[in-house]
Amino acid sequence: TPSATHRGPGATPRRDATTVTLERAVLAANAEVAARNRAFLAARRVTAINLMASPGAGKTTVLERTIAELRASLEIRVIEGDQATDRDAARIRAAGAVALQIETGTGCHLDAPMIARALPRLDPPPDSLLVVENVGNLVCPALFDLGESARVLVASTTEGDETPLKYAHM
């Protein structure tokens, strides 16, 4: 149980059961929307990848190279998650893919409802690839199913070889 000092002066400690119940409820609601996203994508035969990494690890660079290698044979659409800018989306458009920016403000990850709102606007064509470049973070994005077919983690050598151990959920 977190101590009252971590929650502010005069706060009373919470029971763990309340925290777990809330987390389960939030993740369950997200999972329902993720299932609808997955069905939408499957109906169009769209492969969706959730691309995750720390800030600056090279997600956008990997994606630019992927677009360069595949764009002649595969339609690629990208959802860009970032807290404050659209710089990565501009890079992806310059690389030759359609990109839709989601700015999360202070949010540390994308969730299934955000993707659900973006899908009709992005309108991925049948038999295409959708890449969701998630917000740079190795904690929060690991918990949220977006409806993706696969998850890809980019790990930078400068982060250290212990990164997979430190971020086991990722």
Image (tube, grey):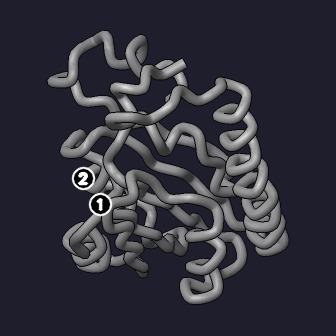
Task: Farthest residue to the bottom: give it.
Answer: 121
Residue placed under numbered mark 2 in the picture:
61
Residue at 45% in and 48% down: 51
> Label 1 is placed on what type of residue?
Glu
Q: Is label 2 in a helix, a strand or a loop?
A: helix
Q: Is residue 102 above or below residue 161?
A: below
* Snapshot quadrant of residue 53: top left
Residue placed under numbered mark 1 in the picture:
64
Residue 81 x, y percent position in the rendering: 39, 64
Q: CA distance from mark 2 to mark 1?
A: 5 Å
Q: Is residue 58 above or below residue 19?
A: below
Residue 66 x, y percent position in the rendering: 38, 56
Image side of residue 36 versus residue 155, left or right = right
Query: Looking at this view, is 77 or 115 the one in front?
Result: 115
Query: Looking at this view, is 131 or 140 the one in front?
Result: 140
Residue at 36% in and 28% down: 6
Residue 105 x, y percent position in the rendering: 32, 68
Q: Alpha-carbon neighbours of circle 1 within 10 Å: few (<14), some, or many (≥20)?
A: some
Q: Is residue 124 above or below residue 131?
A: below
Residue at 34% in and 37% down: 8
Q: Is residue 148 visible?
A: yes
Query: Looking at this view, is 106 or 136 the one in front?
Result: 106
Residue 166 x, y percent position in the rendering: 38, 16
Residue at 43% in and 20% down: 3
Are the residues at dot 2 and dot 1 in contact (C-beta closer than 8 Å)? yes
Q: Alpha-carbon neighbours of circle 2 within 10 Å: few (<14), some, or many (≥20)?
A: some
